[in-house]
Amino acid sequence: MGRLDGKVAIVTGAGRGHGEAVALRFAAEGAAVALCDVIAAEQLEERVGNRIRAHGGQALCLRTDVSQEDDVSRMVEDTLSCFGTVDILVNVVGIAGPTEDVWTMSLASWRTTLTVNLDSMFLCCKYALPEMIRKQYGRVINFSSGTGKQPLSHRTPYATSKMGVIGFTRTLAADVGRYNITVNAICPGTHEERTMELERARAAYRGAEFDEEGARRRYRERGPKAVIAGRWCADEGFVEKGSGSEDAAGIAVFLASDDAANMSGQDINSGGWVMW
Ligand SMILES: NC(=O)c1ccc[n+]([C@@H]2O[C@H](COP(=O)([O-])OP(=O)(O)OC[C@H]3O[C@@H](n4cnc5c(N)ncnc54)[C@H](O)[C@@H]3O)[C@@H](O)[C@H]2O)c1
């Protein structure tokens, strides 16, 4: 028996990284999963949907830009038509945004990061919550970051959006508790590809060369499960942060399960580099 048997979940950003890991784990725990990503639906099928079906799971692959209201409303409608309901919404999508200082950054870069990272969460909740309220049951899980709790130099839009996710989570949790809906956030550490993107951008900011081979070697030596407890995220600290997508996916399964029925408004860290 799976921990999510009979449940229907929407997972955004399911084509890669944390979203992919959450979608695969949810399906393995018995949930029917609507996978959404801005990549083509055929690509999403190939990367994730077919793997779920090959193990006997149910998957619906939808090309959705979660920063666009029409796309999000269609995504929820398609999920309802295919699976009949929605019990769990996992808002995973988040972009890194520019590595640049406020005084040189364009307003467009600032807005794009906030739109993709925050408007998307608002929109997905706006369209999924009416079904959860109707059935008096729901689980909303929002992806913040360790950067939702402490600064990350030269990355103001990202940090602002991830701190915003925590405020959004707490406030929404207070508003929907009476409908038996919980709302929680996960603050993950980095996976390898995202770490490389961040390191590359940071090297460019410094005008330094990026030693990708060395960065990958250091990341792998640490291992995805390494926990660097309480370490502050110094400029050079990226590759020393532990925790991979699987860790966050495990927390998401717990938050979606009956074991977390009375937890709401929480922001849970994965990776050990933030302790509050
Ligand atoms: N990986 C990390 O280092 C890390 C650390 C802390 C927090 N997080 C957070 O975890 C979440 C997932 O991060 P990740 O690194 O696994 O992401 P990722 O970049 O590996 O994958 C994100 C997925 O979202 C999709 N996507 C991007 N924009 C979209 C849009 N507008 N609509 C629909 N899909 C879109 C991409 O195509 C991609 O498949 C994000 O919210 C991120 O901020 C990540």
Image: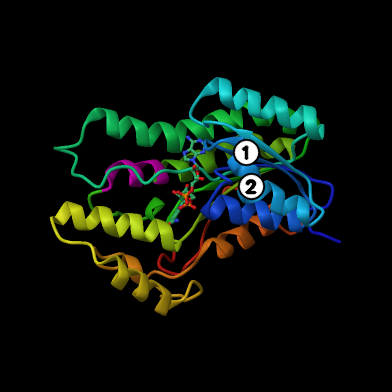
Q: Is ligand 1 less than 8 Å from the beta carbon at label 2?
A: no
42 vs 163, left or right, is: right
Of 165 and 8, nearer the camera is 8
Q: Position of residue 140 (x, y in %)?
A: 63, 43
Identity, as a three-letter code, of the amino acid under mark 1: Glu
Residue at (54%, 22%) from the top-left corner?
69
Of 121 and 48, nearer the camera is 48
Residue 211 in the image: above or below residue 150: below
Q: Position of residue 98 (x, y in %)?
A: 28, 43
Q: What residue would you read off at disc 1?
A: 42
Residue at (64%, 50%) from the top-left corner?
48
> What type of secondary structure mainly makes up the magenta span?
helix
- Proximity of marks 2 and 1: CB atoms separated by less than 8 Å: yes
Q: Is ligand 1 less than 8 Å from the beta carbon at label 1?
A: no
Q: What residue would you read off at disc 2?
A: 46
Residue at (35%, 32%) from the top-left corner?
112
Q: How is the image coloured?
A: rainbow
User: How busy is the neighbourhood of tag 2: few (under 14 within 10 Å), some, or many (20 plus)?
Assistant: few
Span shown in magenta:
155-162
Q: Position of residue 131 (x, y in %)?
A: 74, 29
43 vs 199, left or right, is: right
Residue at (14%, 37%) from the top-left corner?
103
